[in-house]
Structures are given as structure tokens and as C-alpha cells.
Amino acid sequence: MATPDTPAPASDFVRDAVRRDIEAGTYGGRVQTRFPPEPNGYLHIGHAKAICVDFGIAQEFGGVCNLRFDDTNPDTEDVEYVDSIKADIEWLGFTPNTVVFASDYFEQLYSWAELLIEKGLAYVDEQDGETISAQRGGYGNPGVESPHRDRPAQENLTEFRKMRAGEYPDGSRVLRAKVDMQHENMQLRDPVMYRIRRAHHHRTGDSWCIYPTYDWAHGQSDAIEGVTHSLCTLEFDSHRPLYDWYLEQLPLPFEKPVQREFARLELTHTVTSKRRLLALVRDGILEGWDDPRMPTISGLRRRGYPAGAIREFCSYVGLTRTNSRHDIELLESFVRRELNTTSQRRMAVLRPLKLVITNWPTNPDGSPVVEHFDVVNNPENPQDGTRSVPFTGKLFIEQDDFAEVPPPKFFRLSPGREVRLRGAYLVTCTDVVKDEAGTITQVNVTMDPESRGGSAPDGRKVKSTMHWVSAPHAVPATVHLYDRLFTAPAPGEATGDAMDDLNPNSREVLSAMVEPALAEAAPGQVVQFERLGYFAHDTHTPMLFHRTVGLRDEWAAIQKRQQKG
């Protein structure tokens, strides 16, 4: 039930079904869900929605949610993935009721498979996979029954036990359920339950050489655990009749769980296929599963996405029965909104250009004066206070903030123009210094010494305020700027292969100069580089900053265009 600390559950078709079950006393009023990832890769943003649904619904209705690893394919699974999945769920803010594995139930699943054989509902097929696939037919085409379909139960039982004992080579036999080879739903055309596969399992070692398929393990694992509401994405819609068929044949320890499907989360300019993500890592296109360009939860975390923003986004898109692709700018707007309230402000110059104040005062010993300005850390949160920033007559400004020949509507620094240096002084450009190639290497300005703090005593106005970093105090930093990993909004839609739309220029590496306070940034801390965007201090490499999102709300611009259109 909802409490003052737990808001009343939202309304959608899944939550409404849970509500009806509770009111009817189904499952004794219990609510139990599970999140069942296969440990064959890192979780991505699509999984984040499923996590929020599975754990969130259980939490909202006073129930529990288990983390269950679907570890039925030893060829692709690894402890590394198990550990990363646990870490991702914890980071997102959820705690499993318990952590279990499908492999915990291998003996029970095997016993139930023998039961189906004894009931004449399963048989060992000696045909190869290609033949079995061809005999299943297709939509509108009849299936062909296996010549082994009607062998006696006792013979099937003997063969199945030989499969377990390792008496047959890999791929030589499978156990199939005997359902209906003419059913319009292809999932019910005698699906495979077990296959022979000699592969080392990350938990059971080499004790098994036969492994259950996902469909055989899934519903039965739900039943063993006492799951009440089995929530899946829409691609499992056609699997539900098989899910139900298996459960109807077995003596279950609890009431039969019910599977319901909801739309998976897809984003523009993004792929969430584990196969493609693995290829990006394996082929060295990206630097690992936590590369900040990755849509993995670990990649988003390293890039600086807050867990709360991801949860809010998943809640906003909600649960529907229709798949759709959401604009990635919508997710970024949730990230930007949270970071605006939580991130402290700092000054950084990504493409440094030297600026010299020619009338800057000196001390009696001839050394330049060093001033300090108190700058607000976060205008959205006064409790964050202020920091002291050093200011001298030699600064770095952004190259883009100066134009020798300014284009129309350019209000930043140019010859003869006065601008404000953030929180410091008004300065006017007098001349520039160029190298032999004609490239500007230094901009000279004069300051109004009466404008300390950025305001002129005569009240004159300037049209531009620029950030800066004191050159003698600047700390070198590496900054990574990111563009979309895929150039097309729907990667592969036009060509059939998402990799054709891979952006070869998805990352730009810059050598920046930043204010001294950024040397104190904690690993993973996200700050706002004033006028530039939000940047996350890398969790691995000191003084490496990843741009999380820019300052401009692109989602608001998209909405305005849609309204006009």
C-alpha cells in the first residue's frame, strides 16, 4: 500500500491488473515480480526501464522483486556480467529481495522434464537443428512432425537420461515438448526444451552437459519462486501461450503466475542489441562496455547521467502495448533538469586563446597582482555557497569568443568591442598577436579598473559576458565531447545494418584549461562548465571530463517545432 513516503501507484494497464488481483485476493494479495537478465553482456537503457517496472511495481504495491539471472547459455555468460548487473541495479536505486539463478533450479527443471516425458508430452528428437527448423514450417505453412515424435515414453526417458549422462555428442539430440505442429503460433510447434552443450558454466562448472532453453526455464523459475506477475517486453508476447502451456502441465508449488508484456524502450540514434554492442567493444570501435558513448547503464553512469533522471524518464514514458522510439533529447532533458539543481558551477576553457590585460597592475616588486573573486557555486542552491577564483592579467578565453572580423550578431570580443569577464572586469580589445602563419595566438585588451565585479560605474551596458581561467593558475585537463554514436535517428532502418550508420566522429578530444577548483573534483562528480554544459569527472582517469549534456534544451526546441508543424 502507498505511504506518505511512497506515492500512490500510477495507473496503466499493468498496474491496473495488479490492482485487480489484489482486490480479488488472487495470490493471497501478494505481489512478487522478478528481473531476469541473461548475464551475457552489460545492461543498457532498455533494461533500465524493465528494472524500474519490475522493482518499481513491487515496491509500489508493497511486494518484493527478485533478481534472477537467466544463466542457461554457458557459452556467452560470465561472472563479469553478473557483477556488473548487480552494480547497475544498486546504482539505479533498487535492492533485490533475493538474488537467484536459473541454474539453482536445474535439478527441478530436469525432474519436471522427465515428468512431461512420462505424460507423453515431451520426446527426444535425433534430427539436426536445421531439419527441425525446416519441419516447423512457417506462418501459413503447415509443420511436419518429427519421425521420433511418437516413440514410447519409456524410450524417450532412457534417451533423455543418456543425454544427461553425456553419452551423445553436442547437437546430436534435443528434448522437445509435444504440443501442436500445426498451431498458428510458431512457438507452440514442438519447441526445444533441452540441448546438448558441453560448455563450462560459470556456476555449475562441468556438472551439466544439457541445458534448458529460455522458454522452458523461464515460467518454471517464476513458479518455483512464487512470482505472481511476470512482466516482459513485447517480443515475448508470442511466447506467452507456451509459458502457460508448460505451467498447466506441472504440479506447481504456488498459483500459476501470469505473464504480461509492455513496450520496450527504444531511443533515437541508439541501438540496444547486445550483439551489436558486443561488436562495438570486441572490434575496438569503443573502449569498453562503460565507454561514455555506450547506451549501457555503466556507460551512462560514467558519462554523468544521474540515476534519478533515468528513473524519472522511465516513469514519464510509462507502460504501453505499442513499441515506439523516443527522442534521445527527451532523456537528455531529464538529465539536464536534475543536473541543473545538483551540479556546482566551474569555469573551463576548452579551446584556449591567451588574453592579456595590458594595463593590469603590478606589485611593488614588479610581479603581477593576483586578485580573487567570490563566485557562486550553484545559483539553484544557495547552500552550496561560493568559492574563491584567482584572477590575473593573463587569462585564457575560448577561441570562439573572439573574432577579428565579427560576423553579424556577434556580440563577443572583437577589436574595439567591450565585453564583461564573468564576475571580474569590463575589458576592451585593442589588438592581436599572430604567428608566422597568421594565426591569432594572443588577444590584448585593456580593462576598466572601476568595473570590478563586472559593472561599470557609469551604468553603461555590454552585450556579452565571457568565462575565463587565470593562465598562471590554470590546470590542464582532457575533455571529451560527444556527438551521436549513430547518425540516423533509427540506425539501420534505411540500409538494414545499424553499423552502416555508425558515426566515425562521435568523440572529439580537447586539451582544456580549467580553474583550480576542478582539481578537487571527485571521481564521477558532475559539474557545470559555465556556458558550455555539464561534464563528468572520469571515474578512471584524473582530470578527464566527459560532456554529459549541453546547456541547451533540445527537447523543448523539438516540441516547439512539432507544435508549429
Image: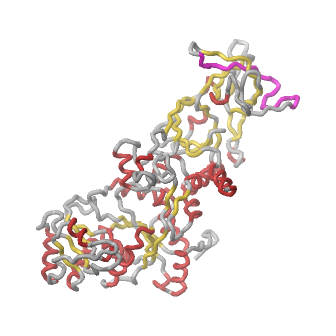
Residue 296 pos. (x, y %): 45, 52
Please report the residue visible at 44 percent of the width from the left and 45 percent of the height from the top. Answer: 502
Query: Is 473 rendered above or below residue 543?
Result: above
Query: Is 387 rendered above or below residue 476?
Result: below
The answer to whether residue 252 is left or right of residue 303 is left
Residue 218 pos. (x, y %): 35, 72
Residue found farthest to the left: 167
The front one of 198 and 186 is 186
Please report the residue visible at 56 percent of the width from the left and 66 percent of the height from the top. Answer: 318
- Locate residue 463: give its quadrant: top right
Residue found farthest to the front: 140
Residue found farthest to the right: 458
Residue 122 pos. (x, y %): 23, 79
- Locate residue 420: give its quadrant: top right
Please report the residue visible at 58 percent of the width from the left and 29 percent of the height from the top. Answer: 351
Q: Which stretch did the figure color magenta? A: 438-459
The answer, for residue 232, to whether it is visible in the render is: yes
The answer, for residue 530, to whether it is visible in the render is: no
Query: Is 198 rendered above or below residue 435?
Result: below
